[in-house]
Amino acid sequence: MRRTLLFTVGIAAIALAGCAREASEAESAAEAADSEAVEADNILLAEWTGPYGGVPAFDRMDLAALKPALETAMAMHLAEIDAIANNDEPASFANTIEALEASGDAIGRVFVYWGIWSSNLSTPAFREIQQEMAPKLADYRSKITQNAALFARIKAVREGGEYETLRPDQKRLVDLVYDGFARNGATLEGEAKERYAAINKRLAELHTTFANNVLHDEESYVTYITEDQLGGLPESFVKAAAAAAAERGREGEYAITNTRSSMDPFLTYSDERDLREKVWRTYYNRGDNGDEYDNNAVIAEILQLRDERVALLGYDNYAQWRLEDRMAKTPERALALMEAVWPAAVARVREEVAEMQALADAEGAGITIQPWDYRYYMEKVRQAKYDLDSDEVKQYLQLDRLREAMFFVAGELFNFDFAPAPEGSVPVFHPDVKVWEVTDRTSGEHVGLWYLDPFARPGKRSGAWATSYRSHETFRGKKTVLASNNSNFIKGAPGEPVLVSWDDAETFFHEFGHALHSLSSNVAYPTLNGGVRDYTEFQSQLLERWLATDEVIDRFLVHYETGEPMPDELVAKIKAAATFNQGFATTEYLASALVDMRFHMVDPTGIDPDAFERETLAELGMPDELVMRHRSPHFGHIFSGEGYSAGYYGYMWADVLTSDAAEAFAEAPGGFYDKEVASRLVEHLFAPRNAVDPAEAYRAFRGRDARIEALLRDRGFPVPGE
Ligand SMILES: [Zn+2]
């Protein structure tokens, strides 16, 4: 405790000088004077050293250092904040906004290691620390957002005469910082401020309760089946189900767990219709079983409190508050997009159901298609129509060649060169992780590093993701980017190529799109690297489109044994199959997104979530043969936290941009490799990150707003008037 205090005082005094670098040097001096001090040696706090402007010391990470590092770094940052807030000089852009941008370097470094432990190298010991530190971190964050003196200075800059003299990106930075505080209650005083804090505290509890109730129902309801009930199920699924049963002490049986990864393949392949219905009902009733884990009352209270909280800030409803800093800007615009696509999606569902019904009738099944039949008959239609053998496709998708293809695309579009960083020159946290140096092809200038952690291992979270260990900035000297991609490919036998599915190859390109978005940043300030939720998936989604370009197919999608490029017929089948099942996928998604938006636009006084969901869907004309992708009682995106509340529409919003931007390439003389379109893409849609309003940036790229018709065409839906 004493150490932290001493530390705080020391840093506060130094931070007045307004330079984080000096602060850390002085910190070392102060610490050296204190014989008890260990933080100065804490590897997680230490400045990054070595090549490329310094790199994280991933080879020397020590979990024992994490807690003291976090505690010290939080104290350091709060001391920096206090120094900014209590500055005697009048507030200026330099001593307030730039000073804020320059603060928190130490905690930023600790969070890079935290991220590796939480996503790439998790252990029970780490999770214990995570649990213990979560409330302390929440406390630290609210100490910043609720610092009244700090907000007063930010407000003074926002409203002062200097503002008009700033560069456009600096103005935007001031606006973003100001809004970040104002939108989170900083403008409130007295009773309203107290009520605001009380609401947030209660909401945090309710979000956790909601998530725990869903988790309870996922873990408690397991459907056990026996050997004679395995008809239709693929071998890999049967093996996993046997292991899952054994894990639960039911050796010799097969467990269908109550999660999407178990439910979805079971409903796709199981020939047992009664069991399909049982598994379907169990899954879609999570959080809705009328017991102590039922989430309906939790939802009602969450909606009520969210509405009350934004009313304190002067908004009509929660959605209005939520969308204000999104690209869509208003709930009405997001609704207009969804409602424009909805009829086409529903019409396609009717066609899909008719096809499935015909197939079932031809089989003599004697049934009417129900929600638990959809995936099953859809799979039969898919096999009959497209005859796409996923194993055959895989033989053309070698992980190493895909990586080379991505480098090729990055070279053509971004003028980047990728070269392996010399072995051992950059520390890594696992031997599987490889690092490439990225340079500008023309100038040879160093752009950054790209880390790739490709393979699954225990303790690594599932799926694929991108993250940055360091973002681009220039306001206190240029910092180059450290970008990373992470996947869960299964390692092949030594010397054997790693073959992946088409979906996984697309995801590989997708995550690389996020990395390119980081690497191409040209912003001056860290905050301007921030993402806008309905915009930030667009860049990555767009990059997926280059996987299916002829240049990539001919040069990189070659058979792992013969070296022959993927045959035209196979490519044609893949492309034809891309619009398959879009009725189901679009409708189940949109139903969730529409219900989410409407929940957050109505007056929630006395709301009955169950009835509200039912009535909203009836009003929309939801087909009987399918349900919302996430029914309200287990819609964690919007009720386990606020990340996607009134924001689930964002996936489709970004997808409209993706489809429309892809058409800009398709229409260009040079197609997907058109130099002129590519340079506009980088200039307007990648490099500015959030330094320019996304809607303006898109207009600068395209000469107009994105059009919904492009998305309709992409999904194979009819376009009105065409
Ligand atoms: Zn993404």
Image (cartoon, rainbow, N blue to C red):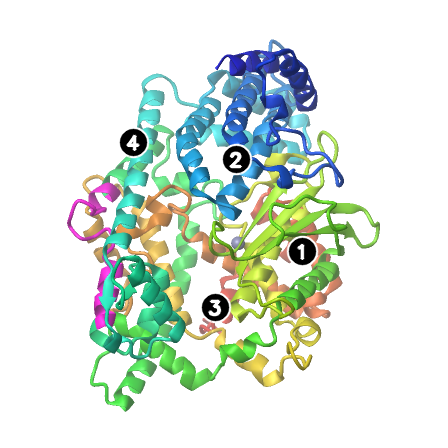
User: What percent of the width, then of the height, locates residue 239?
Assistant: 37, 69
Label annotation for residue 202: 4
Does residue 574 appear in this view? yes
**Of 385 and 436, the residue lying toward us:** 436
Marks 2 and 1 sit apart, C-alpha to C-alpha, by 42 Å
Residue to which mark 1 is pinned: 681
**Residue 202 colored magenta?**
no
At x 65% / y 34%, what residue is drawn? Answer: 525
Tell me the element at label 1: helix
**Image check: 475 left or right of 332?**
right
Query: Callout 1 environment at 10 Å: few (<14), some (14 to 19), or many (20+)?
Result: many
Marks 1 and 4 sit apart, C-alpha to C-alpha, by 44 Å
Q: Name the image quarter holding residue 135.
A: top left
Q: Mark 4: which amino acid?
A: Arg
**Of 45 and 335, the residue lying toward us:** 45
User: What percent of the width, then of the height, locates residue 107?
Assistant: 56, 29
**Of 490 and 510, the residue lying toward us:** 490
